């Protein structure tokens, strides 16, 4: 929403004149006979919800920036849906990763009659909010919630653009057993829904692959000192240490692991697959492994351009930016195919999505999860994440 | 004060009660129609926080025991509801069975907390209760192994919505050809229970036990010398306060249909404590005011921080989310500086918990 | 039980405990003089860490020796922290000196929220990493390792504790502090400017916070606007464990808490067949705290408070 202030009136007038000029040009073009009123403009309001204050604010802001960038790009394309020009507007909300605020904001977005919702970021807020969106029939695409339950509630409105814990944990377990040939594994998680969910699935996959879990240790998502658990792990002499959690813990952990003289390989999921991880691990970063759902940006058409543009505008990608960007694009794509911005009309089209996003080819299964999504693995070499291989997914072969 | 006159004049009192009753009864429709259901949901939460604040008020306000882990009882009530009415164990108990059970279990936890802390006072009591609250949260967060009870950090989803007489409050209810939306129905349920808790609080305040609590707060040794069994009376304060939390927690679980440990963090305990102190410790209307204010204020800032900047400067100068919390912090400071005894302190007890700096 | 692992856990606990002690000293000083828990102290530590880190990052490429850069960072952070501490006392605590006891607790919470979000506006939401300017060489002791920085942390914590004790026990300022703590009204009658003494207490406590902030961010090579909360909580626990208001107690409480956390996470999991693993680390700490307070209601070395405190 933009309130005009006195000083901006000349500007507004100029803009109006310019707009009018554009509109005139459009009318000259005879290519669109279907459009009943070429001047009609519809505003498509997309809600984005993530924690923007509190300890996870940097990840939340990253997500919001990506949604904003996608919306800006869509607006630059001057799309027409259902014969009317559409303008996308982003309603960015802060849920502080608090389930109670998650539902309050869900209600707020429903009241404001948003056309779709991108988010929420955390499982703890996404789950209770998804019921409210489902009751209102508003499509929801999360680019970050990994709790498998999210899409298993029987709601038609829930979609996710990131591998869930099961998918990613399985891929990581296979990679640890088969590629890295680790027989004995120590597992640490940060006791968040994300870290614990991923670590549990990783453990299952390692055990199924004939590996051995020598110890399971825990920390929190606010901790900085891991010396005690790492010392214990050291005494068990594992081949590999897996961490289910985010870079803020993973980086210092990798560093302390090295200074304690632990020789094991260090592997983490997408939460540790960030540039920040390398900064925080410092000299210990070299050789770390991690996984990211999807295919590396550089390998996707438009992926590198997205990465460069995002970095130029908002700085380093923190974590979920590419997925959230794709989420907005998938939503807009479904609207275009349905030729409607009405939630009830374009919702069925989301399920039929086959979209080439910056994170990979996006096809949903019946529940709204990514179908056969690839998981890519990376290693730090010379201070940068280098792509190693992808597991699963058709796009992996490309 | 007006209140004192009301006490004397029966007719005026009845009129005032009627007026308040009518306002409370039509409030959800007015709010829903003018401000939207977001605000109605916020009001529903405010009612839950009133129950919490009144519960904590018994411990902190009446008995003068500084409890910084109060949210644990809310968590106990919420998780009990979640376990007894969800697919987690396949149990689907009715509300009338769960709420008393939740209150009783929370009360038991209140005694468990109270027992080892009887000799502690002031800041030592604060840190022990804080630790107790954290211990409960950590157990909720970790009891998914070796036996899965709480489902750990993933939380429990798919909780049964609250049903009354077989009617689910989660869907609009048809009453005599008239539809009552879900949020309205929850409002009336929460309001009824909040009023019950207000009533119990008022009765307690003026009872023998209430006076014993105040005696302990003012001077524990003198209270003991007067023949008050301070141990039992203190334990009773912890237990009573905890039961209110347990009831509110059960309602929260049914309302949200999802519980996870992050709803019961230390910051929540601190927030409820702020409601009690900022409203006017020991004074029931003050505590209610504190509960309402601290629930509404952050939401007002949320709705205002962005648009007001737009209107003033034509663009968003400061990150609205940071600004919102900044304003909230400043509001806490300003209120306490301006009214150190709270916004609406009790007239009888202005001098309570006077700091003696020795 | 392997000896080298055990020794390493003791070292881990000692280092962690010294960090808690560094922060706890600030809490305990203010408490000792005013009987007030300065809940915002953790945030002052955070401000110290971020200011120091900003300066250090600016100088990291300058070719100066690492220790010099770190010291410059500290010299920059200390006045900012001192000013913050001074302002907190003037704005949020002083007007409430005669108010009900819980009023300053609420303003302290308000100050915490304000400082956190202010820091977020200034330094952004990102994590800041500490550049590798300090030597990270480890020393081997019977199979366990400790870095030079970690030795420095333990030594500095002990030195600061000793220095503060000397200040409080042996100097004129210390005597005024003790007099203020004993009875502010009478101290004032005796010619002590209690406002000045209390301000000075806050300023000294905040200077300590700057040191703690630098040490924490250097040791874990990370700083963040949210770091103060958990650090403050742990340090507060440590201060109470030792007996809040007592400087030696803060040190003892800090080290004890560090050792409990390290040994608890290291051994209790195996002792209970994996049931109480490292996810109950904080539970062990709080459990010991409750146990200590049940038997010694004013902490390990806290003065015996009369029945009516």
Image: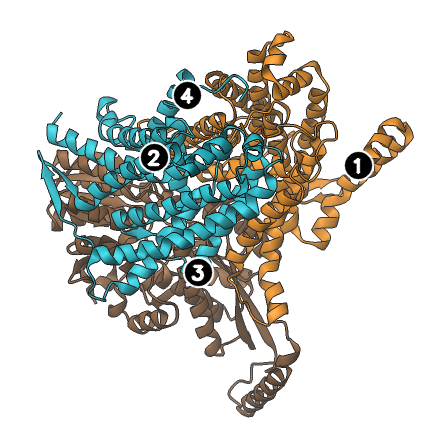
Chain colours: A brown, B orange, C cyan
Residue indicated by mark 4: C293
Question: Subunit of mark 3?
Answer: C
Tell me how far mark 4 sits from mark 3, CA to CA: 40 Å
C48 or A273, which lies in front?
C48
Q: B77 or A37: which is nearer to us?
A: B77
Q: Chain of mark 1?
A: B
Image coordinates of residue C189 in percent, x first then y, are 58, 33
Tags 4 and 3 touching, CB below 8 Å: no
Q: Secondary structure at mark 1?
A: helix
Distance from Cα at disc 1 to Cα at disc 3: 48 Å
Q: Which residue is mark 1?
A: B21
Disc 2 target residue: C166
Residue B254 x, y percent position in the rendering? 55, 35
Marks 4 and 3 on same chain: yes
Q: Which residue is mark 3?
A: C122
Give whichever of discs 4 and 3 has the lower sequence position: 3
Callout in the foreground (3, 2): 2
Instruction: Left or right? Give the position of A300 relative to B75.
Output: left
Of the numbered discs in the image, which one, if any, rests on residue B207? none
Image coords of residue C87 (percent x, y): 51, 50
A290 or C135: nearer the eye? C135
């Amino acid at each position: 929403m933009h309130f005009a202030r006195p000083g901006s009136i000349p500007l507004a007038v100029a803009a109006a004149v310019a707009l009018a000029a554009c509109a005139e040009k459009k009318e000259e073009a005879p290519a669109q006979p279907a459009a009943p009123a070429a001047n009609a403009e519809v505003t498509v309001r997309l809600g984005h919800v993530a924690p923007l204050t509190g300890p996870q604010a940097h990840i939340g802001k990253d997500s919001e920036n990506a949604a904003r960038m996608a919306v800006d790009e869509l607006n630059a394309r001057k799309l027409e849906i259902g014969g009317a020009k559409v303008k996308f507007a982003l309603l960015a909300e802060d849920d502080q990763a608090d389930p109670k605020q998650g539902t309050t904001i869900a209600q707020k977005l429903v009241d404001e009659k948003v056309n779709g919702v991108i988010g929420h970021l955390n499982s703890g807020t996404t789950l209770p909010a998804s019921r409210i969106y489902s009751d209102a029939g508003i499509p929801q695409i999360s680019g970050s919630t990994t709790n498998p339950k999210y899409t298993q509630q029987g709601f038609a409105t829930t979609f996710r653009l990131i591998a869930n814990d099961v998918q990613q944990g399985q891929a990581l377990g296979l990679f640890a057993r088969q590629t890295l040939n680790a027989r004995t594994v120590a597992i640490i998680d940060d006791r968040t829904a994300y870290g614990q969910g991923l670590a549990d699935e990783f453990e299952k996959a390692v055990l199924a692959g004939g590996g051995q879990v020598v110890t399971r240790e825990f920390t929190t998502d606010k901790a900085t000192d891991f010396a005690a658990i790492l010392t214990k792990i050291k005494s068990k002499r594992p081949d590999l240490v897996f961490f289910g959690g985010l870079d803020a813990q993973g980086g210092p952990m990798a560093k302390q692991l090295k200074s304690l003289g632990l020789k094991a390989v260090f592997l983490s999921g997408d939460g540790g697959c960030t540039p920040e991880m390398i900064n925080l691990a410092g000299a210990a970063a070299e050789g770390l492994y991690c996984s990211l759902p999807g295919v590396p940006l550089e390998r996707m058409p438009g992926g590198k351009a997205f990465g460069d543009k995002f970095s130029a505008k908002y700085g380093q990608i923190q974590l979920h930016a590419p997925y959230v960007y794709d989420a907005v694009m998938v939503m807009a794509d479904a609207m275009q195919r349905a030729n409607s911005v009405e939630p009830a009309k374009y919702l069925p089209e989301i399920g039929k999505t086959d979209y080439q996003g910056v994170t990979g080819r996006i096809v949903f299964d019946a529940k709204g999860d990514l179908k056969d999504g690839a998981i890519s693995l990376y290693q730090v070499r010379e201070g940068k994440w280098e792509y190693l291989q992808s597991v699963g997914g058709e796009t992996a072969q490309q | 004060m007006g209140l004192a006159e009301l006490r004397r004049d029966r007719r005026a009192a009845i009129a005032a009660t009627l007026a308040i009753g009518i306002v409370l009864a039509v409030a959800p429709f007015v709010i829903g129609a003018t401000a939207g259901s977001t605000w109605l949901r916020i009001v529903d939460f405010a009612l839950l926080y009133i129950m919490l604040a009144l519960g904590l008020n018994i411990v902190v306000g009446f008995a003068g025991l500084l409890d910084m882990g109060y949210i644990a009882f809310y968590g106990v009530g919420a998780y009990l509801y979640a376990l007894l009415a969800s697919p987690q164990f396949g149990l689907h108990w009715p509300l009338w069975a769960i709420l008393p059970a939740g209150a009783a279990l929370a009360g038991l936890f209140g005694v468990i907390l109270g027992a080892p802390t009887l000799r502690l006072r002031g800041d030592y009591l604060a840190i022990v209760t804080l630790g107790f609250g954290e211990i409960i949260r950590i157990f909720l967060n970790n009891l998914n192994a070796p036996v899965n009870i709480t489902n750990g950090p993933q939380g429990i989803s798919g909780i049964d919505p609250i049903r009354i007489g077989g009617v689910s409050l989660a869907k609009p209810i048809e009453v005599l050809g008239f539809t009552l939306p879900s949020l309205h129905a929850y409002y009336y349920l929460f309001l009824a229970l909040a009023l019950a808790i207000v009533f119990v609080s008022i009765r307690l305040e003026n009872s023998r036990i209430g006076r014993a609590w105040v005696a302990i707060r003012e001077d524990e040794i003198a209270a003991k010398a007067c023949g008050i069994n301070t141990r039992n009376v203190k334990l009773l304060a912890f237990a009573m306060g905890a039961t209110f939390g347990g009831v509110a927690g059960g309602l929260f679980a049914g309302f949200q249909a999802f519980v996870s440990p992050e709803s019961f963090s230390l910051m929540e305990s601190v927030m409820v404590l702020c409601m009690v102190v900022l409203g006017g410790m020991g004074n029931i209307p003050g505590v209610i005011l504190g509960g309402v204010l601290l629930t509404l204020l952050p939401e007002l800032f949320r709705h205002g921080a962005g648009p007001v900047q737009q209107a003033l400067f034509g663009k968003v100068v400061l990150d609205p989310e940071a600004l919102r919390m900044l304003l909230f912090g400043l509001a806490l400071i300003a209120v306490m500086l301006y009214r150190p005894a709270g916004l609406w302190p009790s007239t009888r007890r202005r001098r309570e918990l006077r700091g003696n700096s020795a | 039980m392997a000896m080298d692992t055990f020794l390493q856990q003791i070292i881990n606990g000692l280092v962690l405990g010294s960090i808690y002690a560094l922060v706890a000293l600030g809490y305990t000083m203010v408490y000792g003089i005013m009987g007030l828990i300065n809940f915002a102290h953790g945030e002052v530590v955070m401000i110290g860490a971020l200011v120091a880190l900003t300066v250090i990052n600016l100088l990291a490429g300058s070719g100066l020796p690492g220790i010099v850069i770190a010291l410059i960072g500290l010299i920059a952070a200390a006045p900012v922290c001192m000013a913050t501490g001074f302002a907190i006392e003037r704005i949020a605590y002083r007007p409430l000196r005669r108010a009900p006891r819980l009023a300053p607790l609420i303003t302290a919470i308000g100050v915490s929220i304000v400082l956190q979000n202010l820091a977020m506006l200034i330094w952004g939401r990102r994590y800041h990493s500490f550049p590798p300017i300090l030597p990270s060489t480890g020393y081997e002791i019977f199979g366990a390792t400790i870095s030079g920085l970690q030795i420095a942390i333990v030594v500095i914590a002990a030195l600061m504790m000793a220095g503060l004790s000397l200040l409080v026990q042996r100097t004129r300022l210390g005597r005024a502090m003790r007099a203020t703590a004993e009875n502010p009204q009478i101290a004032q009658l005796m010619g002590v400017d209690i406002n000045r003494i209390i301000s000075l207490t806050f300023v000294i406590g905040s200077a300590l916070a700057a040191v703690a902030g630098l040490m924490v961010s250097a040791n874990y090579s990370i700083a963040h606007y949210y770091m103060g909360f958990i650090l403050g909580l742990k340090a507060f626990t440590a201060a109470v464990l030792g007996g809040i208001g007592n400087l030696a107690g803060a040190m003892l409480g800090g080290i004890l808490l560090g050792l409990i956390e390290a040994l608890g996470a290291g051994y209790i999991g195996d002792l209970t067949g994996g049931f109480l693993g490292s996810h109950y680390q904080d539970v062990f700490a709080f459990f010991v705290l409750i146990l200590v307070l049940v038997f010694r209601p004013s902490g390990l070395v806290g003065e015996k408070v009369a029945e009516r405190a």
